[in-house]
Amino acid sequence: MRIKTFEQYQTAYQQSVEDPEGFWAEVAQEFQWKKPWKRVLDWNFTEPNVKWFEGGKLNITENALDRHLADKADQPAIIWEPNDPEDEAATITYRVLYDRVCRFANVLKKYGIQKGDRVCIYLPMVPELAIAVLACARIGAIHSVVFGGFSARSIADRINDAGCKMVITSDGAFRGAKVIPMKETVDDALEKCSTVQHVIVMTRTRTPISMLKGRDHWWEEEVKHVDANCPAEEMDAEDVLFILYTSGSTGKPKGVVHTCGGYMVYATYTFANVFQYEPGEIHFCTADIGWITGHSYIVYGPLCYGGTSLMFEGVPTWPDAGRFWQIVEKHKVDILYTAPTAIRSLMSFGLQYVKDHDLSSLKKLGSVGEPINEEAWHWFKHNIGKDRCALVDTWWQTETGGIMITSLAGLTPEKPTYAGLPLPGVQLMLVDENGQEIEGNDVSGNLCIKYPWPGMVRTTYGDHERCRQAYFSTYPGRYFTGDGCLRDEDGYYRITGRVDDVINVSGHRIGTAEVENAINMHLGVVESAVVGYPHGIKGQGIYAYIITETKPDDPEMFRKDIAATVTRVIGPIARPDKVQFVSGLPKTRSGKIMRRILRKVAEGDITNLGDTSTLLDPAIVDEIKDGAL
Ligand code: 6R9
């Protein structure tokens, strides 16, 4: 499956378009299947219905663990760097990881978890998070990892949507200098959940917590009393592997569903090729496993390829802004995969945090999550990669399962701010507003994909129509990414950002409707509209326009209260950066908010607001302009 030259990439791409089924069948053959598939691909983008490797039987953990025991049992699978640099790092070999996954899988079974049951995982970045994920996969349970920064209410919504039977959490979490409650947040969530029967709690911070008899169990105690042997459940290629919630244009997060066979093939294929992973290399992906990047490039991709994955518990700026570089030096990291927001933040601290660290082990750098600006690209390439490391800018989404547009490290010519070229199997197209394909080069449009790839979303959990609506209805017969994109004269792709009502804050997708719903719950709020605006570090910030019942006496305090409500409803990541109180919103006669105007004002571009003649009350625009922050 490994591409080794740019010419090989071109040939592979060609083949993947001419004979997609033959192409992916060849890649899939390199994995361990319990039974071969009967059909490589069955699809249509109207229902949609996408099935890869139908009839094939496998268990992804046999590919991630068992098959490496013969020759890599003592090789590190996971290296864990704790939050506090003074604490000891942990190295978990494939043998030990296998053992811990099997034991924990037996704990799940003991508490009644069976194939197809949903398990919510709410843990900090500790090895137990990867172990819990793999243990679910081992027995065919569907994991739904919820990022540790989400509120009790967000957890409850996700648990209820999936009907989870179990939650796996910890007492608390260390994040930089802070200790964050985890179990307590889960307890609050569970007030609103009736499907959860058991909670497994791992000890991290030893924060005092309540443990309910009959429901709550300590991880450490439980794993002592189970068998070390756990046969892998036989899964169909199209059985669900996991659900991961992500924001869209509507108010409620969608449970993106990935299945066992296609996801495994795609996550592993892309990991091997994009990073040009060589045996023994240490791959450090700084994402949290609560997001898709962590699923695919901390857990499944690296492990299925027999690699070594470094997991970091803490934050890039604690104890100081040199923490990433200290980790690179300490563990002799070969590959560093991070986000533009982290790069920009570390840039702002200056080079003194970089210069004392030996970064000579680094060979490859990667960026993901949002468009990388020119300055950050060069800073990363020059000051961290010392102009000798390859830098890949990888575009993809929760829904794509793995990287879609990128350079291959060291093989594809690099172009700053361009993600680059589609990976084999990825058939892109740009379309205009009417859905007409825009052909040729040096053009821009909305990014669609016209042919299935193995790692693509299959459905949104419990609501297939929602999946159709969200991705396959805007441009019938195409998968619509929600992103705008340009293709330059050389056919290289550059993602310009979301074209729907999703804001990308520090690489996290936040639906404007979700934030509005949260703000509207606040006492005294009549209505609100939320848009993104350019933010120096976060990429985009959240700008909220709010109509209140009465003019706030203390606007500053009111802003803080609103932030508290949003934190309680969604989590701190969705807190507005700017709040402008307004007496009305620019609405058309049909009642639609003209977000275009709100975006312009938030961007500080008030000279060119375009046609406002269709507005119900054009005067409101002046008020909004005058009060702009
Ligand atoms: C993997 C991940 C997906 C959205 C996507 C796009 C933005 C991701 C990007 C990028 C420009 C890149 N995005 N990678 N934009 N260049 N290299 O981030 O998944 O959290 O679902 O976000 O992020 O807007 O549509 P997810």
Image (tube, grey):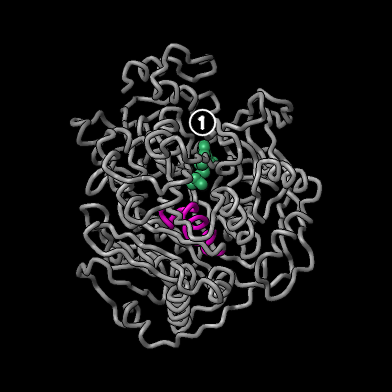
Helix, strand or loop under label 1: loop
On whether residue 302 falls in the magenta region, the answer is yes
Q: Give the total of numbered labels.
A: 1
In this rendered view, identify the residue nearer to me: 441 or 382.
382
Q: Position of residue 552 (x, y in %)?
A: 23, 31
Position above or below: 423 against 1: above
Q: For disc 1, does the CB lie below 8 Å from ligand 1?
A: no
Question: Is residue 292 shown left or right of residue 225?
Answer: right
Q: Is residue 349 magenta?
A: no
Residue drawn where x is 29% and y is 33% of the image: 348
Q: Position of residue 302 (x, y in %)?
A: 52, 59
- Residue under label 1, please give it: 417
> Quadrant of the image for the N terminus?
bottom right
Q: Is residue 491 above or below residue 151?
A: above
Regarding residue 525, the answer to whether it shows in the image is: yes
Quarter of the image with the C terminus in it: top left
